[in-house]
Amino acid sequence: MNINGTQRVNKSTNVSPFPVQQDYSPYELVNGLTRGDQKISAAFFDQYNGQINRLVRHFLGPDEEHVDIVNTAFTQILQSISKLKDPQALTRWVSTVTIHVVRGEIRKRKTRRLFHVFTDATEPYGTSTNATQDVLSRIYRTIRSLNTNEQVVFILHYVEGFTFEQVAEFEQISIATAKRRGQKGKDTFIQKLQGDLELSRFLEEITNG
Amino acid sequence: MADMNLKKMGKWMNDQLGSPTHEEVMEERRAFLETVQRSSSSPSPVRIIRWAAAAAVVFGISAYVAISLFTHSPSDSQVSAGAEKPVVPSVAGYKMHTTDNGGQTIEFDSGSTFTVHAGSDADITHNTAEEVRLLLHTGYVDCAINGNGFTKWHINAGSYTVTVTGTQFSVDWTPKENHLDVRVTEGSVLVSGGKLNADGIRLSMGETVSVRPDAVRIGKVNDGASIDESLAQADAQDLAASAHSRKHQIKNIVSKQLSYNQLWSQSKKARYAGDHDTAYRLLTELRTRFANKPYAKQAAFILGRICLESRQAPMEAKQWFETYLQNTPDGPLVEESIGRLIRVCDQLHHPCARRYANQYLSQYPNGVFAEIATSVIE
C-alpha cells in the first residue's frame, strides 16, 4: 500500500468482485463522495474496500462483527470526507479513519471485558473451527493483552508490514514514540506468549520455516 | 522471539486471514451505497449543526453583499496576494480563513472558481450538482461562474443573498461598516435580503448597487481596475476617473517590467476591467518570459477564451486550447478546454469537432458539454 496515497490508484490492483469501469483521481473521488454521487461512491468503494477490509481483519482477526465494523469505517469516511483538505492524501486518510474506528472498537471491547470478566470465551473472536483458526484466535487474544496504542503499532508494524516511520505518520506521533510502543508491545507479546507453550511452539515452527 | 520471527508470524497471519468473501463485500457495498444515498438526500447531524451555525452568523450580523465583475479594483495588498492564491478543490464544509498575506482559490468541477482574497473569511456550506452555496463572513471574493443551466449559485453574506445563474462577479462586504457595493459587468445577478425589498434587486451587465445604512443607490459601473502600482495613485486621487482614461493608462504599462506574479495579477485585473487587449498582451508576455511556470500553462486556456469571446478569433482560440491540453494534460481545465474546442471546431466546420466530441464523451459522459458533444457527433 502506498502510505502517501499520492498516486492515481489503479483499481485493477485491488481485490474487488466488481468489474473495473473507470479510474477516478482522488480529487474526483472526494468531490463525488461530497456530492453523494452514486457512481463515484461505488467506484470509491471498489477502490478502497480491499484496503479497509484488510486493516479491520488484521486488527481484529476473524470476527463476526467484521462487516459491521467495515461499514462503520465507510460511514465515518463519508461523514468526515469534507474534512479532508488534500484529496491527494485520500489513501492515507482512509487508513487513518479505519484505524480510528478499529481503535474505538478495541477500546469498547476492553471496557466490555472489564465489566464482564468471563466474556472472553464467548466473544466473537474466539469462534475457532480448526487448528489454524485456533492459533489465530490465541494470537489475537495475546495481542489484545497489549494496551490499545501498543496494539495498533504492533499490528501496523508486524502484521501490516509498515516501517516505524510510516506508523508514526499514520498515528501522528513521533518515530521515537512509535518505536517505543512497538518495542513495549513486542516485549509484552513475547512475555504473554511464554505462558502459552503450545502457541509458542507452534509459532516457532512457522517462523523457522 | 526476534523481530524477524514476529514479522514472519505477521506474514503467516496475513496469509491465513485471507480476503473477505464475495457475500461480505456485496453486503458492505450495498450498505455503503445506501448510506451515501441517505446522506445526500437528508442532511447529516454535522451538516445540521453547520447550517445552524451559519444561520446564527447570518442573523447575528447585518451584512452587505457586493458583486462586481471585471471592474473591481481591490487594494494593492489584495493584488499581490491574488497572485499567490493556492488552488484547492471545492468541498462542502471547506472553510477559508485568509490572512492579510494571501488568498485562496476554490475550483469547482465545472471550472467555476471562488477566489477569496486576503483577510477574508468564508465557508462553502453546500456543494451539489443542484446548488453551490458560499457563506461569506467577511471580506472579498471573486466569483467566476461557468453556468450550466441547472446549478444554482448563491453567496450568503449576513442577511443578504446573491443568486447567480452564470456570470463572473465579485463579492465584497465589510460587516463593521455595513457597506455594500455590487458591480456587475457581465450576466446578471439577484441581490436580496437585508434592507432590500422582498423582490430584491436584479443587476445586469454594467450595473452597480451601493447599499449603505442610510441609502441604497443603483448606478452604472464606471470604475475600471488599475493594473499597476502606478495606477494606485490615480485610484486614490479620483476614484471616479473615466474608464476611458484608465484604459489609456493601462495600455501604456510596460509589461516587460512586470514580474511573474505581477503579470498574472495584472492580467486578471485587466480581464476583470474588460480590457481584454491588455490581458491578452500581458498573458502572452507571461508565456514568453515564464514559459515553464504554472500560470503560463493556465494562461493558454485564458488566452483561448479571450480569443474566442472577445477577439472573435476562433482559429487562434483553437490553438490556445490545444496548447493548454498539450502543456497540462491532467490540468483542472482539461474538460473546459475540450468542451470549448468542440464549440470552436464546430464553428469553424473543422473535422476535429467530432474527434474532440468523442474524446469529451469518453472522458466526461455526464459533463456540462456532453450535450453539445453529442449533437456534434449526431
Image (spheres, rainbow, N blue to C red):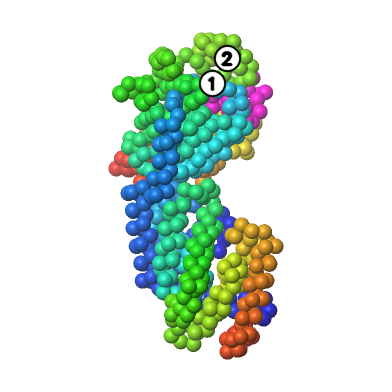
Query: Image point 61% across, 26% down: which residue?
Result: B77
Magenta region: which residues? B254-269
Asked if residue B209 is positioned above or below residue B4 in the image, the reply reads above
In reply to whether residue B267 is colored magenta, the answer given is: yes
> The residue tagged with tag 2: helix, strand or loop?
helix
Task: Give the mark nearer the N terminus: 1 vs 2.
Answer: 1
Q: Can residue B324 be seen in this view?
A: no
Amino acid type indicated by mark 1: Ser
Asked if residue A101 is positioned above or below residue B313 in the image, the reply reads below
Name the image quarter holding the C terminus of chain B: top left
Amino acid type indicated by mark 2: Asp
Same chain check for tags 1 and 2: yes
> Quick one: label 2, few (<14), some, or many (20+) residues within 10 Å?
some
Nearer to me, B140 or B359: B140
Nearer to me, B48 or B336: B48
In reply to whether residue B142 is colored magenta, the answer given is: no
Tell me the residue that label 2 is attached to: B235
Q: Position of residue A77 (x, y in %)?
A: 46, 56
Asked if residue B216 is positioned above or below residue B119 in the image, the reply reads above
Tell me the residue that label 1 is attached to: B73
In the rendered structure, the residue with mark 2 lies on which chain? Answer: B
Query: Image point 36% across, 25% down: which residue?
Result: B192
Q: Main secondary structure of the magenta part?
A: helix
Q: Position of residue B218 (x, y in %)?
A: 39, 15
Q: Label 2 near label 1: C-beta < 8 Å?
A: yes
Name the quadrant containing residue B214: top left
Nearer to me, A92 or A14: A92
Q: Where is residue A7 in the image (x, y as percent from the top left)?
A: 55, 55
> The residue tagged with tag 1: helix, strand or loop?
loop
Q: Is residue B247 left or right of residue B134?
A: right
Query: Image point 36% across, 62% down: which residue?
Result: B31
